[in-house]
Image (tube, rainbow, N blue to C red):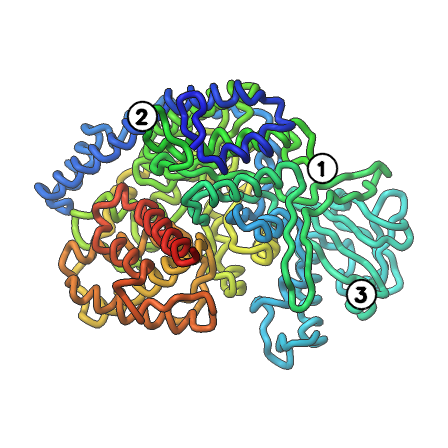
């Protein structure tokens, strides 16, 4: 370790800061380390006190449930939570005042990606998902059925291709209709006098709303692209009669390209397995590459080596003849870790690990300063802001602490106040009940709130662990607390005047292969008032973008503002099991939860994969991260606590499901089967610990166990190599 200003710094981290992060940042090395040490030693004690307050409140709630029956004492329950400070006194009505917010957050509504930033290829793909081919997205997914000869196959199927084109042009007719005829009938698009003309049935027509024509590429009489605008999102109709698809199209349309993932969260948290300096430096290095515009990825695709870089901006001629430059990449936010975990990468003057969340705030902000200084090849924020999403905060004191940390980091880096913007994730029960107060503490810098069913459910179970057995996992989505939580989040955001300054987000679609089902269901996120929602892939972003053309979220939010109300009674309705489950139902629930838990944990602990498509018990691929694990582990711990199953039954299920997971991963040459030696399998032991010790984990989080077991696996692997 390197001694620096009362800190001990891991050499890998120190070298990265000195050689890569600081050069070009206009931050002096000595001043940085002095300021970093001051922030660490000044804020760490308060960080620890906030965690102690979480623990104290949870102990009081546990004691209350041991004394009282919630079903008989519901009115007393809310009064009790107020007495202990769990429910706070509400602030007077207020509006947020955030300024210098990019239009992607302030005024556009559209899909949002979340991607592990430690995977350069995924990060670049997500950044480039600002624009996506609608033809490709439709052709490769189940949105287009395979009936009547429209199978995907291994070669291009013109029957399927015709279905794709028909779907896309029906969409164009819906969102940008012509004065007469259909986009399906157009034989030529051309520009005359700054207006878009379309030849239909030997006549010329124009758009019904000519304001939707935004620009073009190429020659006026033979454009290579026609740009449309609807609900603040662009659509690029690409034209090329020599293209294999374009030559079969009456108008020469080769593709319809959608403005899709307008924002992306580059994740340092739930989708990342970063447990030491080696892991963390990779996270930071990739974020720096994104901020400089230099990140690239080289990988094998078949027998070819492919290099992937960040997309350039897109240039068009606008109707008045001036140049129109549109961003080629998604606006990037970065999700830091929460307040809980500490890092061995930095030790304080007492030799203690320091809060990782504080390190993240300092370092990700330092790296983003390269974008603010415009020294990179590309720019991220045109407004000159840095967007940091802060997860897993409990109540307004923790939001105020984050704000204090942001203030001090701005001072350290020489940034103007409120350059660092914050996204507050509403995924803990204490935050849901006090969301307006949390927003108040960061009202000058907030740009994002959201709901997250997964983490929020994990905290719901953990907080009321001793109240009784919880409903089955799949029944959670129809419970009163969840419906109240989802609506209350939007109500609060609207009442605090987030529209026009900040996003109100909705959660992830977890089945990346089930795009038809997503298209049939995910429009409800817009109808609920969300102006962004998470999707699991660039393809999903392209398809979900259609919803934002079909529904105008700004109008929906105006209507919902008239319907807001106090939803605390709903949020405080515990999701307790009514009646009993049959032995078969109990075993089904155990099998489902345990199989998913094992499938994720084995990749996290032994492969260092924080997010991946994990097959469920029915072999359907689900996007899994630590939030999904938190639900499963807490649900199993809850049923154990209340005797719906025994330790012996749980262990039998774990061993049987380990064989299922082993079989699902049999083709992976690096996979280590669990069932061959349960005692030696670190992944299997981690899974057992997450369940049997689940109720004792802080707030039900999985990180402490996962991090310790991942370090154990890395140490064993290192020892085996030497």
Residue 647 appearing in the image: yes
Q: Quadrant of the N terminus?
A: top left
State which quadrant residue 229 falls in: top right
* Above or below, comparing residue 545 to residue 424 in the picture: below
Q: Could you tell me which residue is drawn at 53 percent across and 18 percent down?
A: 31
Can you tell which of label 2 and label 3 is closer to the viewer?
A: 2
Rendered location of residue 687, percent (x, y): 29, 58
Residue at mark 1 to residue at mark 2: CA–CA distance: 42 Å
First of labels 2, 3 by sequence position: 3
Instruction: Say which mark, if any, is on residue 350.
Output: 2
Mark 3 lies on a secondary structure that is helix
Observer-nearest residue: 696 or 300? 300
Q: Which residue is mark 1?
A: 377
Observer-nearest residue: 384 or 494? 384
Position of 536 compared to 639: left or right? right
State which quadrant residue 41 falls in: top left
Q: Which residue is mark 3?
A: 246
* Above or below, comparing residue 547 to residue 439 in the picture: below
Rendered location of residue 645, percent (x, y): 17, 63
First of labels 1, 3 by sequence position: 3
Residue at mark 1 to residue at mark 3: CA–CA distance: 33 Å
Residue at mark 2 to residue at mark 3: CA–CA distance: 68 Å
Q: Could you tell me which residue is drawn at 53 percent across and 25 percent down?
A: 98
Rendered location of residue 244, percent (x, y): 79, 69
Q: Could you tell me which residue is drawn at 52 percent across and 44 percent down?
A: 282
């Amino acid at each position: 370790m390197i001694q620096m200003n009362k800190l001990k710094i891991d050499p890998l981290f120190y070298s990265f800061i000195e050689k890569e992060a600081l050069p070009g940042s206009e931050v002096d090395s000595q001043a940085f380390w002095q300021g970093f040490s001051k922030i660490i030693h000044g804020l760490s004690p308060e960080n620890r006190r906030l965690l102690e307050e979480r623990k104290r409140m949870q102990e009081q709630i546990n004691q209350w449930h041991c004394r009282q029956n919630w079903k008989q004492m519901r009115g007393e329950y809310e009064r009790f939570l107020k007495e202990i400070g769990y429910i706070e006194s509400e602030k007077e009505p207020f509006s947020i005042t955030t300024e210098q917010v990019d239009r992607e957050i302030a005024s556009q509504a559209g899909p949002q990606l979340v991607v592990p930033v430690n995977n350069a290829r995924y990060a670049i793909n997500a950044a480039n998902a600002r624009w996506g081919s609608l033809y490709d997205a439709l052709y490769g997914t189940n949105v287009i059925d395979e009936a009547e000869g429209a199978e995907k196959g291994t070669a291009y199927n013109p029957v399927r291709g015709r279905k794709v084109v028909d779907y896309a042009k029906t969409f164009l007719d819906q969102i940008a209709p012509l004065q007469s005829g259909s986009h399906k009938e157009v034989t030529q698009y051309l520009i005359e006098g700054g207006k878009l003309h379309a030849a239909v049935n030997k006549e010329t027509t124009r758009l019904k709303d000519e304001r939707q024509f935004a620009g073009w590429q190429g020659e006026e009489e033979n454009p290579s692209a026609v740009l449309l605008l609807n609900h603040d999102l662009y659509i690029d109709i690409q034209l090329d009669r020599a293209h294999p698809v374009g030559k079969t199209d009456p108008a020469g349309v080769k593709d319809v390209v959608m403005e899709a993932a307008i924002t992306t969260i580059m994740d340092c948290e739930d989708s990342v397995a970063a447990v030491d300096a080696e892991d963390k430096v990779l996270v930071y290095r990739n974020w720096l590459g994104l901020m400089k515009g230099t990140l690239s990825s080289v990988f094998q695709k078949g027998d070819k080596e492919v290099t992937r870089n960040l997309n350039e901006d897109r240039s068009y001629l606008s109707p008045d003849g001036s140049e129109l430059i549109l961003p080629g990449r998604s606006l990037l936010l970065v999700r830091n870790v929460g307040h809980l975990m500490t890092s061995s990468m930095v030790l304080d003057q007492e030799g203690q690990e320091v809060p990782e969340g504080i390190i993240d705030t300092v370092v990700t902000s330092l790296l983003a300063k390269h974008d603010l200084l415009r020294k990179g090849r590309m720019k991220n924020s045109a407004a000159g802001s840095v967007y940091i999403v802060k997860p897993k905060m409990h109540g307004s004191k923790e939001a105020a602490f984050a704000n204090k940390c942001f203030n001090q980091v701005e001072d350290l880096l020489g940034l103007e106040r409120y350059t660092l913007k914050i996204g507050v994730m509403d995924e803990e029960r204490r935050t849901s009940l006090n969301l307006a107060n949390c927003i108040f503490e960061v009202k000058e810098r907030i740009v994002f709130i959201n709901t997250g069913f997964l983490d929020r459910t994990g905290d719901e179970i953990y907080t009321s662990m001793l109240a009784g057995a919880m409903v089955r996992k799949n029944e959670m989505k129809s419970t009163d607390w969840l419906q109240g939580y989802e609506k209350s989040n939007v109500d609060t955001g609207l009442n605090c005047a987030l529209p026009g300054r900040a996003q109100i987000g909705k959660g992830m679609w977890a089945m990346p292969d089930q795009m038809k089902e997503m298209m049939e269901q995910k429009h409800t996120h817009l109808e609920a008032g969300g102006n962004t929602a998470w999707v699991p892939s660039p393809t999903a972003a392209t398809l979900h973008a259609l919803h934002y053309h079909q529904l105008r979220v700004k109008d929906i939010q105006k209507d919902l503002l008239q319907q807001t109300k106090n939803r605390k009674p709903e949020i405080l309705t515990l999701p307790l099991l009514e009646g009993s489950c049959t032995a078969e139902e109990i075993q089904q629930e155990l099998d489902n939860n345990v199989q998913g838990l094992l499938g994720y944990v084995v990749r996290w602990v032994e492969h260092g994969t924080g997010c991946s498509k994990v097959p469920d018990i029915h072999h359907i691929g689900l996007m899994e991260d630590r939030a999904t694990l938190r639900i499963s582990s807490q649900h199993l711990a809850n049923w154990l606590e209340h005797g719906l199953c025994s330790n012996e039954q749980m262990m039998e299920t774990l061993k049987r499901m380990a064989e299922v997971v082993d079989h699902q991963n049999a083709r992976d040459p690096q996979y280590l089967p669990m069932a061959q030696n349960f005692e030696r399998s670190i992944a299997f032991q981690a899974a057992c610990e997450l369940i049997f010790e689940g109720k004792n984990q802080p707030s039900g989080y999985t990180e402490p166990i996962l991090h310790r077991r991942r370090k154990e696996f890395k140490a064993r692997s290192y020892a085996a190599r030497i």
